[in-house]
Image (cartoon, grey):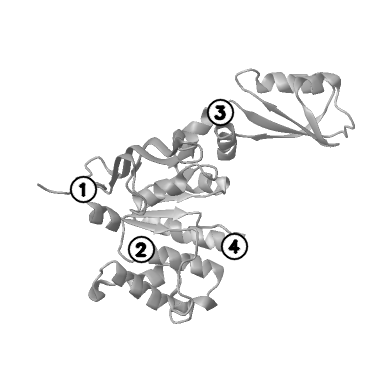
Amino acid sequence: MSRVTLNLDNKALKVNKLTKKYFHKSQNKKIFALDEVTFSIEKGSMIALLGPNGAGKSTLINILAGITNKSSGKAFINGFDLDKAVNEAKLSIGVVPQELVMDPYFTPRETLNFQSGYYGVKKKNYITEKLLEKLSLKDKADSYVRYLSGGMKRRLMIAKAMVHSPPILILDEPTAGVDVNLRQTLWDSIKELNSKGTTILLTTHYLEEAENLCKDVVMIDKGKIVIQGEIKKLLKNIDLKSVNIYTENKIKKLPNELSNFGFSLKNDGCFLINYRPSKTSMENILNLILKNNIIIKDIVTTEPSLEDLFNHLVQ
């Protein structure tokens, strides 16, 4: 009987009622790090796994990576059942942790060659040179790791996770502590990997970053999934908009009618309102402003963001 479960539905990752529980001695009760978590990821996609600290993200990643044993539930990695085809499942995934784990006295080339050996890759099948080129590390291939910049070290961590050519890559806070310019370079490398077919699951506290990069999101809190789906569709369901009104005339104080309606003054040339489209319309808002003899110079409407959705769901 074959140990391999074929992934016939084009899913790179599938978890079903994945649960991890611990017994808390001092509280004399079971604590759920993960509580029947269920979701799937299509091959070739890039998805954000979001949640506050302690939500269960690291536990989930560690289970998928084979570092932590689950209590119950099922997990399929690239079609391989984590219970029945452990080695195949592990070889199908690469994990980039938050910490920079590497020997400072190795060179990037040596680092990748040693990592390849750990995965049992034969020397003739090493892809070290290909990874150095792909992640813009070729020029520093023979320099000691301790002399690399922060961005280069981050890229080297990604290369380490890719030495065995896994179809799935998990990035755990890959841009933590990286400045804006290096972050952009890092994401360019990640987007290129994704464009070549690598499925990417990332965790990040930069919600704007996740919204710009990913099509789908899974939000987890207290071990449970609170929402999942396509980001654009989820944001359309948020009943909230923000409007900034810029005025020709300076305003020292808002008319009582506007203040009572919910407007607030930002400065003497701008005031704003956060409103629910289901309760009022933009037409009503504009009519109320014009009724109070305010000359409008410009209007800027802000649509709901992933951060708004996150703050709404995760308290």
Q: Which mark is residue 289?
A: none
Disc 4, disc 1: CB below 8 Å?
A: no
What residue did someone put label 1 on? Answer: 84
Is residue 263 in sight in this rendering? yes
Q: Nearer the viewer, mark 3 or mark 2?
A: 2
Q: Nearer the viewer, residue 36 or 78?
A: 36
What residue did someone put label 2 on? Answer: 162
Q: Earlier in the sequence, mark 2 or mark 4?
A: 2
Q: Going by the image, does 83 lie left or right of 15? A: left
What residue did someone put label 4 on? Answer: 181
Give the amino acid at mark 1. Lys
Give the amino acid at mark 4. Asn
Give the amino acid at mark 3. Ile
Q: Nearer the viewer, mark 2 or mark 4?
A: 2
* Quadrant in which the C terminus is drawn: top right
Crowding at dot 2, Cα within 10 Å, few <14 / some 14-19 / many 20+, comes out as many
Q: Residue at x 33, y 66 (%)?
A: 163
Q: Earlier in the sequence, mark 1 or mark 2?
A: 1
Q: Earlier in the sequence, mark 3 or mark 1?
A: 1
Crowding at dot 4, Cα within 10 Å, few <14 / some 14-19 / many 20+, comes out as few
What residue did someone put label 3 on? Answer: 238
Residue 115, compared with residue 80, is above or below; it is below
The residues tagged by marks 4 and 1 sit, at their Cα atoms, a distance apart of: 44 Å
The residues tagged by marks 1 and 2 sit, at their Cα atoms, a distance apart of: 24 Å
